[in-house]
Amino acid sequence: MPKKKGRLDFIRMKAEKEQVAWVTAYDFPTAQFAEAAEMDMILVGDSLGMCTLGYSGTIPVTMDECISHCQAVRRGAPNTFVIGDMPFGSYQINNSGAVANAVRFLKEAHMDAIKLEGGLRTAQALKSIADAGILAMGHIGLTPQSSGPLGGFKAQGLDPASARYVIEDAIAVQDAGAYALLIEAVPPELCAFIAAKLTIPVYSIGAGGPCDGQLLISSDMLGIFQSFTPKFVKVYAQVGKEITAAFREYVKDVHSGVFPDDEHSYHIRKGMEDEYLKMLKEYE
Ligand code: KIV
């Protein structure tokens, strides 16, 4: 079992240009699979709203839902660096509320760090959380919680003017005391520029390389989330199709009486069959 990584490992990996591989997980089994695969870290993203809870977006996700899923992931991956994602409304109202909610991720779900969206506009909340001694990761570029104002799930920083906003956000996140930054859905040139400019590790989801590591949503890369697959996702398995095929086979077997068979049944203790059937007859 490899040693659990921490912030200093991620700083060293950036210095030595060693890439960090991480995925989202929302439940116990996925966390176990990620840890067995020696994933460098795991994000319990608020994408759990769409990927696991069936919401149409991340806005309805609550703190209690995040905590519950973080707890399940922590049970499945006790030796992996796990980040809890702060849901919409948990850090926007005021800074003390943001700190209180970040503290819940550590105390109730044993997370190693938290992540929150926004650059300049949420830098004060990030600073308050970091000042409280909590490892906080910023998330800029396409930020799903504000996809409404951003005009939908759209790539960001495609032209010089909007790239400037992304750079300003990145600087604000580092200045606020974040230990790392995640950039979503911007051109690789912009992400690579920011990764080279900042001293903290900079990770990409849909922002190409080279930077300091890559994140993918597990439900996307495993072919589980059916509604849509973003352009940047490489699909590594069709687990959803496998599950549907297995369920279909099971329905067929039950309907036709093939299942359950002798192999999948418990048997009366040997030598007691007659006595057993006689006893059953008493109740006829
Ligand atoms: O919630 C999540 O999984 C995320 C990713 C989209 C980066 O924040």
Image (cartoon, helix red, strand yellow):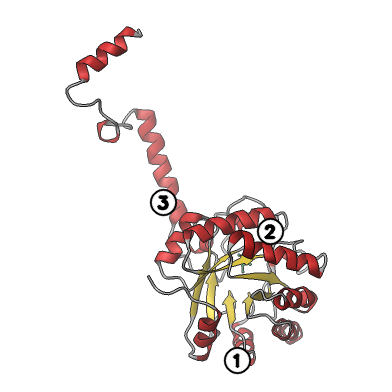
Asked if one can make out residue 151 in the rendered structure from this viewpoint, the answer is no
**Label located before the other in sequence (1 or 2):** 2
Residue in view at x 59 percent, y 66 percent: 111
Residue 73 seen anywhere in this rendered image of the structure? yes
Q: Amino acid at mark 1?
A: Ala
Residue highlighted by disc 3: 242
Disc 1 versus disc 2: distance between alpha carbons? Answer: 31 Å
Residue 141: percent from the left, percent from the top?
A: 68, 76
Separation of residues labelled 3 and 2 (CA atoms) = 27 Å
Name the residue nearer the viewer: 12 or 239: 12
Closer to the camera, 38 or 156? 38
Amino acid type of the residue that numbered disc 2 sits on in the rendered structure: Thr
Quarter of the figure with the N terminus = bottom left
Position of residue 36 measured from the top left corner of the image (x, y, whole percent): 40, 65
Q: Which residue is mark 1?
A: 196
Ligand 1 under 8 Å from disc 1 Cβ = no
Ligand 1 - quadrant of the structure image: bottom right
Which residue position is annotated with label 2?
A: 58
Whichever of callouts 3 and 2 sits on the residue coming sooner in the sequence is: 2
Question: Does the Cβ of the disc 2 residue fall within 8 Å of ligand 1?
Answer: yes
Number of numbered tags placed on the structure image: 3
- SS state under label 3: helix
**Residue 259: image tag:** none
Horizontally, residue 16 falls left or right of residue 158, namely: left
Query: Neighbour class for label 2 at 10 Å: few (<14), some, many (≥20)?
Result: many
What type is the residue that disc 3 sits on? Glu
